[in-house]
Image (spheres, grey):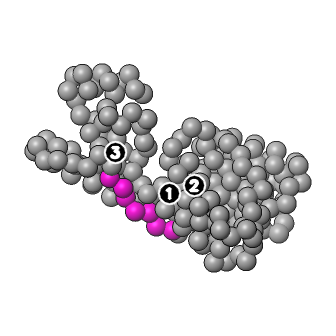
């Protein structure tokens, strides 16, 4: 979206970027986003508190910085603990159907694993759908990231292990305040990070 951001800058229209990073930060007044790295850390810490060892499948998203940060937080948390082994990394999109197809392909290889980290909740739910279709037992621990209504419902029903929840209302409030501060001539931070909560 760089051409659009350049056009806004040339027209002296400030851009307040919410939720997802852009590559060219110089074209936005500020970026307000979740602490994506911490989301991955939270999922890893929860898994480690429940399992003494694990074989892990990571389902990341192509060229999306936020999900890459989530995966990095997860990997950095387990890297000094060899009993937690990543046995497969898969690059998908952030859509349920694509993740479901990717998980079906993994299952067709008879790979043994007991944990899945999805880059977001739709990915985690796609993995869950594939596992249910293949009647995989014993149960695989699946983590998502977002705190979406569907993700929370699946946790409540016992199908997902957890999700690191973003706070969209809080992000909106912070964005509005940043915009007012900017219009009042106050200096605003280039990056504003909003904490996440594990559910």
- Looking at the image, residue 130 sits to the left or right of residue 49; the answer is right
Residue 72 got which mark? 2
Q: Identify the secondary structure beneath mark 2.
A: helix
Taking the image as shown, residue 69 lies to the left or right of residue 192, namely right
Q: Earlier in the sequence, mark 2 or mark 1?
A: 1
Say which mark, if any, is on residue 31.
3
Element under disc 1: helix
For the residues labelled 3 and 1, say whether their Cβ atoms are less than 8 Å apart.
no
Assign a secondary structure to mark 3.
Answer: strand
Residue 84, percent across and down? 72, 67
Q: How many marks?
A: 3
Q: Earlier in the sequence, mark 3 or mark 1?
A: 3
Disc assigned to residue 37: 1
In the displayed structure image, the side of residue 61 where residue 32 appears, left or right: left
Bounds of the magenta segment:
192-198
Vertically, is 11 above or below 179?
above
**Can residue 150 be seen here?**
no
């Amino acid at each position: 979206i760089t051409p659009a951001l350049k056009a806004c800058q040339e027209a002296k229209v400030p851009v307040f970027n919410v939720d997802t990073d852009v590559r060219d930060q110089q074209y936005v007044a500020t970026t307000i986003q979740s602490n994506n790295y911490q989301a991955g850390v939270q999922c890893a810490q929860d898994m480690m508190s429940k399992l003494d060892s694990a074989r892990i499948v990571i389902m990341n998203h192509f060229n999306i910085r936020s999900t890459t940060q989530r995966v990095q937080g997860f990997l950095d948390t387990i890297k000094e603990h060899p009993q937690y082994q990543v046995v497969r990394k898969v690059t998908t999109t952030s859509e349920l159907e694509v993740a479901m197809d990717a998980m079906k392909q993994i299952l067709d290889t008879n790979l043994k694993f007991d944990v899945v980290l999805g880059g977001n909740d739709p990915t985690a739910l796609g993995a869950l759908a594939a596992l249910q279709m293949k009647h995989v037992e014993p149960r695989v621990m699946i983590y998502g990231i977002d705190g979406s209504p569907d993700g929370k419902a699946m946790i409540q029903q016992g199908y997902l292990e957890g999700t690191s929840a973003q706070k969209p209302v809080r992000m909106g409030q912070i964005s509005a305040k940043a915009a007012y501060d900017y219009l009042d001539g106050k200096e605003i931070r280039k990056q504003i990070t909003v904490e996440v909560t594990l559910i």
